[in-house]
Image (tube, rainbow, N blue to C red):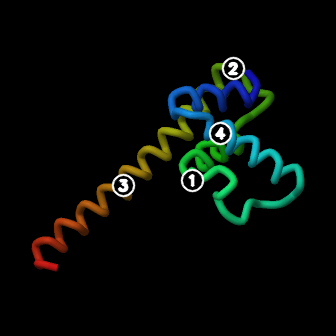
Amino acid sequence: MKLPDIIKIANEVYGGCTVVQAFENYKRHRAAGTRPQDLSEVGDGLAVFIATELTETYDVKATTARQLSTAHDAMNTAKEQLTDVQDEFLRVLEKTKRKGR
């Protein structure tokens, strides 16, 4: 499977075409040896994150099954990390409310 096909899978469920746009932006900057200074070219930090993670974990030599498994694992790790951050915000919010702040 080619990387654009994996990006398209993510894009289909993410909505719009922002993951594809982020991927194209990533490729352009990578080819030029630069990094985007901000997200204004895409406007969606999560789409940029998804495209970056999928691109950086992609192995052109892997089987399709391995490529899909790697993409799944990358997104699952991100989900777990985001859930941890979300849970911590909730914990701090509840603590703040108890103190009446």
Q: Please tell me in which quadrant of the rendered image residue 68 appears.
A: top right
Which residue shows up at 76% across the image and 25% down it?
A: 2
Secondary structure at badge 1 equals helix
Which image quarter: residue 18?
top right
CB contact under 8 Å: marks 1 and 3: no
Choose mark 2 or mark 4, whichever is in front: 4
- Tell me which label, 2 or 1, sits earlier in the chain: 1
Which residue is the site of mark 1? 45
The relative height of residue 20 versus residue 39 in the rendered view (above or below) is above
In whole angstroms, how far apart are the C-alphas of marks 2 and 4? 14 Å
Q: Of marks 2 and 4, which one's residue comes earlier in the chain?
A: 4
Q: Position of residue 95 (x, y in %)?
A: 17, 71
Q: CA distance from mark 1 to mark 4?
A: 14 Å
Foreground: disc 2 or disc 1: 1
Q: Are marks 2 and 1 in contact (CB under 8 Å)?
A: no
Q: Amino acid at mark 3?
A: Asp
User: Residue 4 location, x and y as percent?
Assistant: 73, 29
Identify the mark nearer the N-term, 1 or 3. 1
Q: Disc 1 to disc 3, how far (Cα)?
A: 18 Å
**What's the residue at 72%, 21% (across, down)?**
63
